[in-house]
Amino acid sequence: MSVYDTQDPAARETALDAAEEAIRHGGLVVLPTDTVYGIGADAFSPDAVDALLEAKGRGRDVPPPVLVGDPAVVMALAIDVPEYVEQLTEAFWPGPLTLILTAQPMLHWDLGETRGTVALRMPDHEVALDLLRRTGPLAVSSANRHGRDAATTVLDAATQLGDRVEVYLDGGTARLGTASTIIDTTVEPPEIVREGALSREDIVAAVGDIFTAPEPEADESDIQQPDADQPDADQPAADQPVDDQPGGEEPEAEAPAHAEAEPVVAEPAAEPSDELPTRRDG
């Protein structure tokens, strides 16, 4: 394994060349991102993806996300993309937001048991973006053994992954130090499946409340219309004689003057309860 210091501008090109070469022949690379360090492999090489999962000690039932170097790549890797996804990428890419989308079925890749979806993110880190523009989309997961803390430095990553990785790119301490927020856009309304560096409030403030289903519109067929054949309650039926009283209406009967109102018996006051209202789980 080799470690390259990408914080040194003079050494960065050499580091990126080595990382690109490792990716091209199916090797694994640890790279810095804005959230935590990632372990990356060629997304279109099933053997490389299997090696990534093995290095982490993780099964195919937890497929890795895919990092991209340009938001336009979304339309090539996914289908049935909701309109609000463009708003999300404009607001938060590059940045700590991962979007689960319906994968393009024509792509020749095998990321694991994805159930026809793909998780995409564009990281906000110059070194990561430089590498992605050289290699194209990379399958990238956090650079740690499964069940252990994500690496925030290259030393953390190397301690956990060792020589399973061919090239380590040292970009210093990860700026955010926490995982990205993941939104599943394949359901309606979309759901936050992991809240990370971005909160729900951050997202709603930027693009509106996409997480609440709109109220259903009333169907005009459900609105009860008056029956044209039913006579108005205030009008007499055609075959009913009209009373001889003026206006055709029977006068209201007046109550006798001597009638007395029945006394009202007051109900006893309710006893105070010691029980609290039942709490509903939300």
Image (cartoon, rainbow, N blue to C red):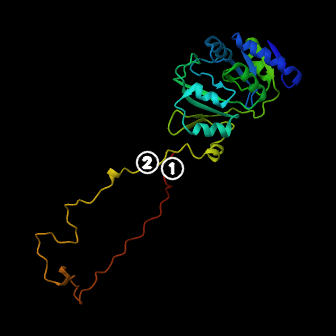
SS for tag 1?
Answer: loop
Residue 231: image quadrant is bottom left
Q: Which mark is residue 279?
A: 1
* x and y percentages locating residue 211 in the rendered image: 55, 42
* x and y percentages locating residue 258 in the rendered image: 23, 89
Specify the amino acid type for callout 2: Pro
Please tell me which residue is depicted at 56% across the width and 19% down the height of the picture: 107
Q: Label 2: how many residues lie within 10 Å, few (<14), some (14-19) or many (20+)?
A: few
Please tell me which residue is depicted at 69% across the width and 32% down the height of the picture: 179
Towards the viewer: 66 or 59: 66
Specify the amino acid type for callout 1: Arg
Quadrant showing the N terminus: top right
Q: What is the distance, in whole Å, between disc 1 and disc 2 at their CAs?
A: 28 Å
Please tell me which residue is depicted at 81% across the width and 13% down the height of the picture: 2
Would you place residue 66 above or below residue 270 in this image?
Answer: above
Towards the viewer: 168 or 238: 238
Q: Label 1: how many residues lie within 10 Å, few (<14), some (14-19) or many (20+)?
A: few
Would you place residue 87 above or below residue 236 in this image?
Answer: above
Would you place residue 261 above or below residue 74 in this image?
Answer: below
Q: How many marks?
A: 2
Q: Nearer the observer, disc 1 or disc 2?
A: 2
* x and y percentages locating residue 202 in the rendered image: 66, 44
Q: Which mark is residue 216?
A: 2
Q: Which mark is residue 48?
A: none
* x and y percentages locating residue 252 in the rendered image: 22, 82
- Residue at the far bottom: name it: 257
Please tell me which residue is depicted at 60% across the width and 27% down the height of the picture: 119
Q: Is residue 80 left or right of residue 57?
A: left
SS for tag 2?
Answer: loop
Q: Is residue 265 left or right of residue 215?
A: left
Residue 27 visible in the displayed image = no
